[in-house]
Image (cartoon, rainbow, N blue to C red):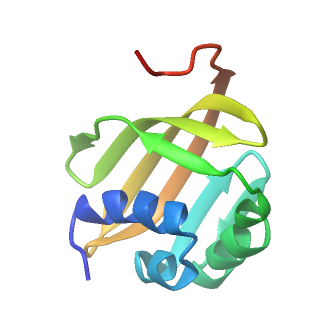
């Protein structure tokens, strides 16, 4: 089991691997995920969100930037490829007992560059 901010890095790795078991292990039982499509309360609801909605998108691929850590809160800007578009997204995590207790996902604008030099 990961601890502290390692859970956030493991979260992105689990999404890229489409590994619902690894993803579920990162959340507290009573965790909450807030997104543009709704709020999902509890580990099982969050797992269902990823398995039944997010992982159905063939090109889903998050590229997180540096983590900004302030105690039990972690923020990160992500270049999210999804549905043929790359969008800037901001995630704000709240950690508890080495796991993710809450994640709020804020959608930003599409990006027009490829992000490569």
* Residue 52 image position (x, y, % from top left): 78, 73
* Residue 110 image position (x, y, % from top left): 68, 22
Query: Can you say which quadrant of the picture contains the N terminus?
Result: bottom left
In the image shown, does 66 or 105 lie closer to the viewer? 66
Query: Can you say which quadrant of the picture contains the C terminus?
Result: top left
* Residue 9 image position (x, y, % from top left): 33, 57
Is 89 left or right of 85, judged from the image as shown? left
Spot the residue most to the front: 117
* Residue 17 image position (x, y, % from top left): 51, 68
Identified at 57% across, 66% down, the residue is: 32
Image vertical order of residue 23 relative to residue 9, above or below: below
Is 68 left or right of 93, judged from the image as shown? left
Quarter of the view holding residue 27: bottom left
Identified at 22% across, 64% down, the residue is: 4
Image vertical order of residue 63 relative to residue 48, above or below: above
Is 115 left or right of 106, judged from the image as shown? left
Identified at 46% across, 68% down, the residue is: 14
Image vertical order of residue 46 relative to residue 107, above or below: below
């Amino acid at each position: 089991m990961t601890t502290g901010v390692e859970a956030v890095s493991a979260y992105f790795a689990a999404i890229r691997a489409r590994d619902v078991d690894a993803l579920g292990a990162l959340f507290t039982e009573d965790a909450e995920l807030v997104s543009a499509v709704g709020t999902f309360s509890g580990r099982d609801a969050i797992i269902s969100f990823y398995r039944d909605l997010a992982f159905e998108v063939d090109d889903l691929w998050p590229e997180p930037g540096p983590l900004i850590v302030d105690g039990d809160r972690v923020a990160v800007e992500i270049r999210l490829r999804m549905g043929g578009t790359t969008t800037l997204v901001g995630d704000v995590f709240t950690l508890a007992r080495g796991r993710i207790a809450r994640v709020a996902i804020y959608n930003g604008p599409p990006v027009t560059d490829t992000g490569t030099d």
